[in-house]
Image (tube, rainbow, N blue to C red):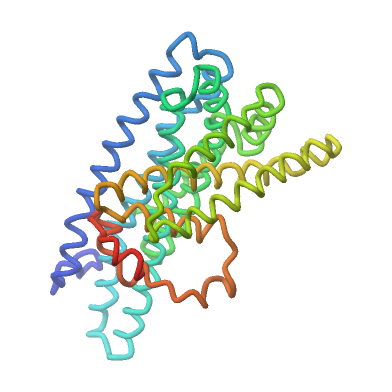
Amino acid sequence: MPARDLPHQGETEAGAGRSACAADAMERLEHLCAVGLRDAGAMVADPKHRGGVAASHLDLDRRLAVTLGVLQQVAHHAPQQARIAAHHDGVAVERAVLVVGAFLGRERQQVDLLVDLEAAAALTFECAVATRGADDDETGRRLRRILVPLAKVRSTRAAIGAASQALEILGGNGYMEDWPMARQLRDAQCHTIWEGTENICCLDVRRAMRNDGAHEALLDRVERALAGASASPALGPAVDAVSATLVDARLAVAHLESVSNELQLLHTRRLTYLLSDLAQGALLLDEATWALGHDDARKAVVARRFAGQHLVTSRARGILDNDRTVLDLFEPLTRYGTIELAAAVAA
């Protein structure tokens, strides 16, 4: 019997529920993307926003769609692959233990992919609404000017990592052309090239800083997010991480202004990643604060997880942290369910 038919035999209730909810979660994400990117397209079409912004619109809808598509494949197929392994040759006890261990590793990968997706989406959506929260149109224009290349760099790079991990999760089936992940990986690589390679986008960030002082608008936006962040203990570690990264970003900008042009160009890529990580962390604080005000700590968990992965350096690669986020909160995180504050703090 073909391996694809095996997951349907003896499918567990938990596995069936997880697969059934994957499509609903992705439908919700795709709807959010459609709304946010529709606004972004309208913004670029507006003549008063022409110039650097219009030139660097960069087809962000297609770039982010790659990441969404990759996550959808992981959400649908990774649980099935665990069940395929579980049915292979009747499964000895030792084999079952290996399968469970591998599946826990996959769950961690899925959570981290989801966190990167939500961070990239937050950054992309901010491109569309930059002027709404700015003090004036000029500040909003400068903020958008630097956010667009930052969003392009981050979302397309995240898509490649997600596609590579998803292919590995599916093992040999992921590598075969008759499964969808091989194409996802090929397509993901294309999007770091189209509409400006990553190095070109990094130079565009530098140009926005030198010509428009766009980084000041970005740093002010981060300070605004910190000032309005919730004091909830579930969000505290993320707030501290964003605050520390803001200090690092100001130090980096000041240092690069004082060195030679060659050194500035050498570190342009590093600075771009630093600013994009900072921006994503700050925007997740905004989203988490709003959600906490509606008795949902899920986004606070996402913000905290992102900060731990991208903004701080954990001792012993995080092994000493005893973080139980994946073990205790996998279901509500991947199904977009509500997480109570006590559960978020405990994890």
Point out the image quarter for the C terminus. Answer: bottom left
Can see residue 99? Answer: yes
Question: Is 293 on the left or on the right of 270, as rendered?
Answer: left
Position above or below: 38 against 65: above
Q: Is residue 222 above or below residue 134?
A: below
Where on the picture, by quarter, is residue 187?
A: top left
- Quadrant of the image for the N terminus? bottom left
208 or 198: which is nearer to us? Answer: 208
Q: Residue furthest right?
A: 260
Residue at left 44%, top 35%? Answer: 124
The residue shown at (49%, 53%) is 239
When the figure is inspected, residue 245 is found, relative to residue 305, above or below; the finding is: above
| Residue 212 picture location, percent across and down | 65, 22
Q: Is residue 9 above or below residue 185?
A: below
Image coordinates of residue 186 in percent, x first then y, are: 47, 46
In the rendering, at what x and y percent does residue 342 appear?
Answer: 29, 66
Image coordinates for residue 176, horizontal then vertical, percent: 39, 58
* Residue 53 or residue 246, whichever sits in front: 246
Q: Residue drawn at (23%, 43%), measured in percent from left and top?
A: 27
The residue at 72%/45% (across/down) is: 251
User: Which residue is farthest top?
Assistant: 47
Q: Is residue 317 left or right of residue 100?
A: right
